[in-house]
Image: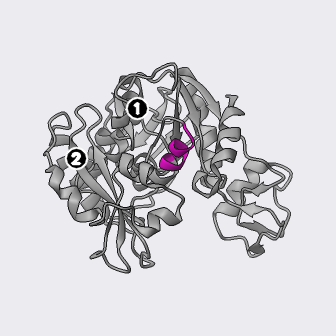
Amino acid sequence: MTSVSEGFSSKQYSQIMHDHLEVLQDGFEECMCVCPFCFGRSLQFNVSKGVWICFKCGESGSAKKLVEMLQGTYMEPEADFLEISRDLRALAAESYEAPQLLPESMLLRYRHRTQEPHRLWLARGFDKAVCDLWELGFDPLADNGGALTLPYRNPATGHLDGIIFRNVNPAPDQPRYRFPKGFPRSRSIYGSWLVDHMLSDAFPTFTVTEGPTDAIRVSQAGFMSGAQYGSSISAGQIRLLHRMGVHDLVLFYDYDRAGLRATEKGTHLAEEFNVSKVLWDKDKYCWHGTVCGCHFGQKHKDIWIAHTSNGNCPSMRKCKCGRVHEPDPCSLELEEIRIMHEGAVEV
């Protein structure tokens, strides 16, 4: 393997390794670690080249890819790697159990003066009761048309930890979500503070989605839900689910390439929880927005996903199968969410 990220020292790669992985054997150049994806004890990390590979599940890549996979899909893809590493070291030094508290009055600036939900939330099908429960607001002063606001609270105390902003019209080089500085996404689950550390007979399962708005939509259908901030669930989020008292977990991911991968990776959670996954209607929905015309791997879905996801196929074209392409929970009617949720199958 060769390094994808250039210009970084072994010390910097070693810092990234220790920030993200449980190191079993710290060697001079090759280090053995616990894989955060399959939990095998055979992930090898080369601190000289900044590359890694798990000999159990086959996941591999650069140090930068490891950070992005564990931090979630909302990380800016062009972010400076040295800045990421510095922020991670600073985050490690912070006390997550005793975060800086924000005043509750901070939420008032983002709530409509009439206390009615903003029209953009209503357009998503979120009524006043849902907007009040999740304390949804709007920041009109944000760039490019403003930003929807989603407060995040400490799962242990319920205190306001920060505000997440979802840009309405992000620029091409701008991420859709903006998180508070130092926000520990890999150790947080959106909506965790509403579980109150105890699931009841009325809510025996916890449904996990990729994004916050998906979690809100699923909750609107009557299920206890939260979001994992991205398509890959981290070890820190798994520990938080245990502290929340979760035993039965339902995976409700988007029906696209990332969502399919997340569902496949989510099968390892069966060792931790009783896991079920939601099935999408293949006659109504399509998991790819674009397809390739070279017929490479079309007989095997997993190979086709890997082939088309690199974007290098010269025969790529928009899918015209007539089905709904790459849907997510937010795009569904509440009754359909209920039917799909009740029809979830064990993994």
Q: Say whether residue 6 is visible.
A: yes
Q: Position of residue 170 (x, y in %)?
A: 42, 75
Residue 278 location (% of width, % of height): 67, 39
Quadrant housing residue 140: bottom left
Range of the magenta residues? 215-222
In the rendered image, the quadrant that contains the C terminus is: top right
Question: Which residue reaches farthest front?
Answer: 114
Image location of residue 231, percent across then percent down: 52, 48
Nearest to viewer (mark 1 / mark 2): 2
Tag 1's secondary structure? strand
Q: Nearer the viewer, residue 88 or 49?
A: 88
Q: At 72% across and 70% down in the image, what residue appears?
A: 313
Q: Is residue 315 magenta?
A: no
Residue 178 visible? The answer is no
Q: Quadrant of residue 36?
A: top left
Q: Earlier in the sequence, mark 1 or mark 2?
A: 1
Residue bearing mark 2: 161
Amino acid type indicated by mark 2: Asp
Name the residue at 65% across, 69% down. 311
Look at 38% across and 79% down and name the residue there. Answer: 145
Q: Which residue is mark 1?
A: 33
Determine whether, in the image, residue 6 is placed left or right of residue 125.
left
The answer to whether residue 217 is magenta is: yes
